[in-house]
Image: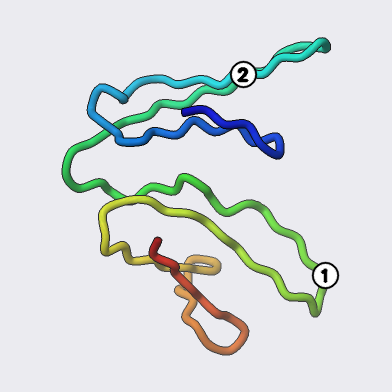
Amino acid sequence: QMDFRNNIATLVFNQVVINDSGVYSCRAENSIGEASTMALFTVQEGKIAPFFDIKVVHTYAPVGSAADFECHVTGTQPIKITWTKDNKPIRTGGNYRITFENN
């Protein structure tokens, strides 16, 4: 099933099967030109190692403002998340609040 709303093109798999594995591409074109993007889709049976399908991005913030980093990780539960700054672990408290929404 394909959908295109708010300039977001979506390909939805109603039920993934092993044969869905492969290279998928999305192509957009208009009277000015065209663009395309591609990705490998791997369907696995059983347990899946964690991987970031949305990674943290470089962020800038003015002094005194609030800011956050956000990422999305997929894999077999439970997943343990660890945040670090300069290779030192960060824990909730003080200036930090760490959350993990399992959906």
**With respect to residue 34, does 98 lie above or below?**
below
How far across and how far down the image is residue 18, in percent? 23, 28
Q: CA distance from mark 2 to mark 1?
A: 35 Å
Q: In the shown orientation, is residue 57 left or right of residue 19?
A: right
- Residue at 30% over, 36% down: 15
Secondary structure under badge 2?
strand
Q: Nearer the viewer, residue 14 or 17?
A: 14
Q: Label for residue 62?
A: 1
Which comes sooner in the sequence, label 2 or label 1? Answer: 2
Q: Is residue 30 found left or right of 27 in the rendered image?
A: right
- In the rendered view, how is the structure colored? rainbow
Q: Residue at x 58, y 23 (%)?
A: 37
Q: Amino acid at mark 2?
A: Ser
Q: Is residue 58 above or below residue 46?
A: below
Side of 19 relative to 53 (left or right): left
Residue at the (81%, 75%) spot, across then down:
63
Residue 92 location (% of width, % of height):
50, 83
- Residue 70, how many percent across, how many down? 57, 60
In which image quadrant can residue 19 be found? top left
Q: Which residue is mark 2?
A: 36
